[in-house]
Image (cartoon, grey):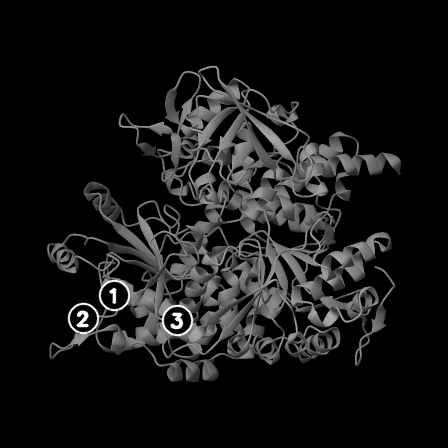
Amino acid sequence: MNSAHRKPLPGTKLDWFDAREAVEALQPGAWDGLSYTARVHAENIVRKCEPAILRECLEQIVHRKRERDFPWFPARVVCHDILGQTALVDLAGLRDAIAEQGGDPAAVNPVVPVQLIVDHSLAVECGGYVPDAFEKNRAIEDRRNEDRFHFIDWTKQSFRNVDVIPPGNGIMHQINLEKMSPVIYTQDGVAFPDTCVGTDSHTPHVDALGVIAVGVGGLEAENVMLGRASWMRLPEIVGVELSGRPQPGITATDIVLSLTEFLRKQRVVGAYLEFRGEGAAALTVGDRATISNMAPEYGATAALFFIDDNTLDYLRLTGRTDEQVSLVETYARTAGLWADALKNAQYERTLHFDLSSVVRTMAGPSNPHARLATSELAARGIAVGLDKARAEEAEGKLPDGAVIIAAITSCTNTSNPRNVIAAGLLAKKANALGLSRKPWVKSSLAPGSKAVALYLDEAGLTSELEQLGFGVVAFACTTCNGMSGALDPAIQQEIIERDLYSVAVLSGNRNFDGRIHPYAKQAFLASPPLVVAYAIAGTIRFDIEKDALGHREDGTPITLMDLWPSDAEIDAVVKQSVKPEQYRRVYDPMFSVRVEHGEKVSPLYDWRPKSTYIRRPPYWEGALAKPRTLRDLRPLAILPDNITTDHLSPSNAILLDSAAGEYLAKMGLPEEDFNSYATHRGDHLTAQRATFANPKLFNEMVRDENGKVRQGSLARVEPEGKVMRMWEAIETYMERSQPLIIIAGADYGQGSSRDWAAKGVRLAGVEVIVAEGFERIHRTNLIGMGVLPCEFLPGTTRLTLGLDGTETYDITGERTPGATLTLRIHRRSGETVEVPVRCRLDTGEEVAIYEAGGVLQRFAQDFLEASRAA
């Protein structure tokens, strides 16, 4: 730590670093106009930056310079078990590599505190209408994941600075919001703003507390874990002025889905947003968290709210100590992070959104930014054909548009007590009127925190939800992460035989095709009370605002308005039933257990040779150990716009007829225990087979006899021109040691921060990806695996170039930040075309990582050099 600008913090025994003093010394009067984001980064620079570059780095913040990078040192790393486990598998493999080179493996540890929460492993095999569903699902989770949990248990004992929250306790983001984030961190007698990176794109959830927390890929998280700065350029910082108040009956879900559509149109991709104004000030932290959580859905990197009285109220509500609440207020007021101190903050752009304009809203049928007002269901062609659906139901068939999954899930909504209690009150009214869930609907309630169950019990709403099939099935991500579990075999068979249009309705944050369940052809995002209503309706062909959910004894129809609770009802139950002692009861024992790191556990993991979950990573052997070549590349795929990480590396259930399913069966695993793709990402032999395994993939190299692109996990091997399953094509190219390239459209890699979306293509032999644009996290993951991302210049695309996959490609030019490289295209006709492309190694640090072969290779080289020098 630098000693410059260190001062006593008034009323405490702590010190703080006065960033305002440093900024004013650089440019008098500049501080008053700085944004919240700029102030937090300035403090980080003043406290952590090397004195030799301190002034230069501060100038980038104050003068909005973007020509050079500055370092950011997050205080901690939060992980869910999928990416967190794979990151720790990588570190365990790194220890092996260090030991083989004569280094000390025990010296390889996270330098920054790492908090790993096991929340992505549970599948909803038992719905919320099954007695003891939670216990049964947990038992299945433990059985299926024994290898994984054995490894995770080893990591918490073998690695220093790693804390593990075991399965069955909640979702990482909700636990981060309700407990882990102190808002103001203390270390070595110094108070400073809490900051973190997380191995999930929804890490900005805790931005609602004024904490800069961003989602990163597992590879970037490893870099931070190992004590390296996260080098960055000043992001675009956008003010979002919220005005007005929500209309009666409007939930935070309606607000965030409307904002997601609005902000996508405003092109805030990669920006840091700061929500401000009277509308923002009036929102509870629960409402703010719902908005912050969906930052990746509207494309932003961060979505911040200022620290104010609402922040303090929330900290008290969730059981933080009086001392911590006092520290947050004292520091924020002293350091200029209190809301009132930011009235004059200046932004490059300020957007305006009127909360009173929001109507009841869903999103779908395929994207979270595809807003769908419930008043427009019929006009949009969603709520059509109800008579046909009801006729099919009367015949004992599944109706057209059958809602096969209705899930109250995801920290997006279950961290907001108003949303959950609204669902409980709607269920209570539905039960009183004799309504019930349709029998084909797999319904579930999976809160992100055990505190939710306590306040539902307190409010007397648990039994009401259970009566409609929404009993608690887990405290985990479940359906939102694609872990919706198996359908009733008879229902699944009917969907297949009739090629039925069936859907999911969930209170999550993502609804990409193929994500929620293989047999849910599309999915809709909705607030928790709407999820309950659709479980009663049973079909998406239903006009949820107008059609009858049932009838009273006198024959009068029961509509949504008869069930919808008033704001006053919701607020009264929240006030009476949500209490600090509930949060303390949940979190005090959870965080009181500390593991002793001793000599009993080996620093080297004893890899289980037959495991399909955990395997020593191959990053220092095979194809990756060979010299890189950027010549004579063949395309593995030519892809359209909006390729998501779910296309690149799906996370949902593994089917028997998939490449991964066939491999697991060969390894002796019973089909019922195949689990999900996500859970097998610690074993590269299974995870590789998930590369482009999404059945919704459109590879433009694969067309039918009419020239139409075929859907499926397919590739065309060249020069033979033979079409085969994607994994078989990858195997063919691997056997030939053929270097590969991927050509793609816009927004390549959007979606979850999934490192295997980069690892899978790298292990397949992909050296370069040329796209019209990249999602931020995925681009850094590619670099972390040694894959070169390049961007077509405006006006040039795969379509304008007429690429069909028969070509071979070279990339030439000096790889420096933002350089123009040459893509040389050799057509089958003998013609050669040279196309300029932009190198998307954006910083000197990224160039260094890429040239080393990836994050782990770079660290190993530096570690061994330092060891030898010592």
Report which residue position mark 1 lands on: 536
C-alpha gap between disc 1 and disc 3? 25 Å
C-alpha gap between disc 2 and disc 3? 28 Å
Looking at the image, tell me whether mark 1 or mark 2 is earlier in sequence order.
1
Residue 358, picture quadrant: bottom left
Helix, strand or loop for disc 1: helix
User: In the image, what residue occupies the spot 67% across and 41% down?
Assistant: 91
Q: Are marks 2 and 3 in contact (CB under 8 Å)?
A: no
Q: Mark 2: which amino acid?
A: Gly
Residue 592, picture quadrant: bottom right
Would you say 270 lies left or right of 11 here? left
Q: Residue furthest front?
A: 795
Q: Position of residue 336 (x, y in %)?
A: 72, 74
Q: Mark 1: which amino acid?
A: Ile
Report which residue position mark 2 lands on: 550
Report which residue position mark 3 lands on: 358
Instruction: From the image, state whether disc 1 or disc 3 is nearer to you.
Output: 3
Q: Residues within 10 Å of mark 3 (few under 14, many from 20)?
A: many
Q: Position of residue 217 (x, y in %)?
A: 59, 47
Helix, strand or loop for disc 2: strand
Give the mark count.
Answer: 3
Would you say 782 lies left or right of 541 here? right
Looking at the image, tell me whether mark 2 or mark 3 is earlier in sequence order.
3
User: In the image, what residue occupies the spot 38% across and 24% down?
Assistant: 724
Q: Mark 3: which amino acid?
A: Val
Task: Classify 163 as above or below 685.
Answer: below
Q: Are marks 1 and 2 in contact (CB under 8 Å)?
A: yes
